[in-house]
Every structure is written in structure tokens, then in C-alpha cells.
Amino acid sequence: MHYRVVATILLLAAKSANAHSFVEQLTNIASDGSYVSCFGYPRAFVDKSADAKFDQEANKWLLPPAGGPPFINETHLLCHPSQQVPNQAGSFSRLQTRPGSMIALRYAENGHVTMPGGGLNLVGKPKKGGTVFVFGTKQPRPGETLQNVMHWTRDGKGGDQSGRLLTAQNFDDDRCYQLSDDSIVLGKARRLQTPNPIPGQPGSDHELFCETNVRLPGDITVGQPYTLYWVWQWPTAPQQEREPLHGKDEYYTSCIDVDVV
């Protein structure tokens, strides 16, 4: 069993409610719930580090784009420009997995779970941090749109039928937390309930990623990659006395390939 520990400790210690979330790791889940094998990563993944030059825009993809119309339309591309086609960055390789396997897609909660309202001065946000959808396809294509993929269904008959919905879950998995001061009651309670020390440093603190657990289809082809689209829906409800009066869409996505072995 092998794990790669990503060098994120100093960066993660800062309050991050103004940051947003994207998939940072994938791993296989054994029948007893433990993680097995090596981690895998999204397309073109850029690692967080203690380097202050890290730019979350390298991984984050917001739809609709900031400053534009408040709702998605047929022109909005599903994947980040760097994730339009299958490609891995450096040593951040694909997850190796099998048909029918249960896998975890892991991401930082960044205050959207443990801070009231999902962040600083936010109103109209859904409970549990909104909804995460995971879609799968054997036919990924550049230029895929969010609107098209959101029509896919579990039986594979929705939309253009080129993929299927694999799961829809709360963003909050009821365990995850960021590192922050203990005035945030929920975060403190979770840290006590599920401590997550830095490997090899008993008694230390480290944030605990949220995860979306999904079972891969049993009919995917061994020897060929399979593509996953992680879509986080975090809309704002209509407001009576402040903007947005009619509400607004807010989606974040990660585009991922796994090797089926």
C-alpha cells in the first residue's frame, strides 16, 4: 500500500472561506472502508503547497463565469481550459481502478461546511454545502458543456445518451473540516470526533477532506480510460431585499480520467 502525502500543511492552516473547492485526490475504497492503492488526480492538476504563489484558478472552474449572466446556458464549457482533453501533469497520475470499484473523490471544504452560511457574509446558500453530482462517460470530448451533461440520467438515456449520472450527494459528507479557530463550533466538534494527524506526527492537526463516494459501472472496459465529471452545484436562492433578486447559478467542476485495469 502506498500513499503520497501532498505538501499542503501551511497553506491549509489559513482560513479559506474565500477559496472554492475542486477535486484534489482520488482513491480506491476497500470493502472495510479503508483507502487502498495509490492516489490519483484530476486532469492537469496543480498541487497546493506552502508556496504563496499558488493560484487556485489553476484548478478551479466556476460556471457561469464571474461578472457574466447569473444562469448557465448552452455555451458554458464543462471543463477548465487546462482540462478540455485527457492529460496529467507531471507525477500527478490517474487513479488505477477496476470495473465496479468504489472510489472516493476528495476535496477541501474551505469553510463551505463549517462556517455559518457556507462562508463570510453569504446568504441564500443551500444546506449541507449544496449538491455534488458525478457523471461518467466512455466518450469524453473537448467542448463538452455543463448544460448537456446535466441532462444525463442514471439509466444513460438522458440528454444525448453519451454518459450517465453515477451519484448525487451532499457536498458535506458529515465528517470533513478545515483548520480554523475553535470558535467555529461544528469544525471543533468534527476535529474531536475524527482527528486527522499529519502522517508520522501523532497529535498534530491536519484538515480532513470531504469526499464523494461513487461506485464505477461494472461494464466499463478494462484497458481503456473512463472519464468522470465532478460537478458541485452551490446556487444562491432569490433574495427579497438584496441581490441577487432572482437568485443565481454557481457551479464548480473537475474533469478526471481513471485507468481501468
Image (cartoon, rainbow, N blue to C red):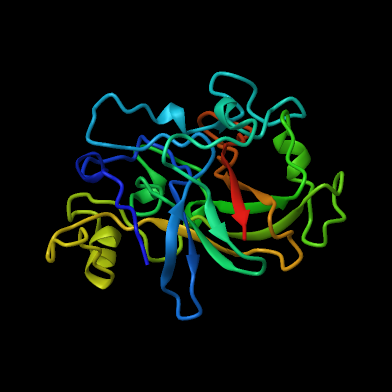
Residue closer to the observer: 242 or 3:
3
Residue furthest top in the image: 67
Residue 183 image-quadrant placement: bottom left
Residue furthest bottom in the image: 32
Question: What is the x, y in percent for residue 69?
Answer: 65, 22
- In the picture, measured across the screen, residue 36 lies left or right of residue 133, that is left
Name the quarter where the N terminus is drawn: bottom left
- In the picture, measured across the screen, residue 220 lies left or right of residue 86, that is right
Question: What is the x, y in percent for residue 245?
Answer: 59, 31
Residue in the image at 43% along x and 55% along y: 39
Question: What is the x, y in percent for residue 78?
Answer: 66, 34
Residue in the image at 60% along x and 53% along y: 259
Residue 209 image-quadrant placement: bottom left
Name the quarter where the C terminus is drawn: bottom right
Question: What is the x, y in percent for residue 200?
Answer: 16, 62
- In the picture, measured across the screen, residue 222 lies left or right of residue 176, that is right
Q: Is residue 148 above or below residue 28?
A: above
Residue closer to the observer: 80 or 192:
80
Q: Is residue 193 above or below residue 85?
A: below
Residue in the image at 61% along x and 19% along y: 68
Residue closer to the observer: 5 or 213:
5
Count of numbered circles in the view = 0
Residue 223 image-quadrant placement: bottom right
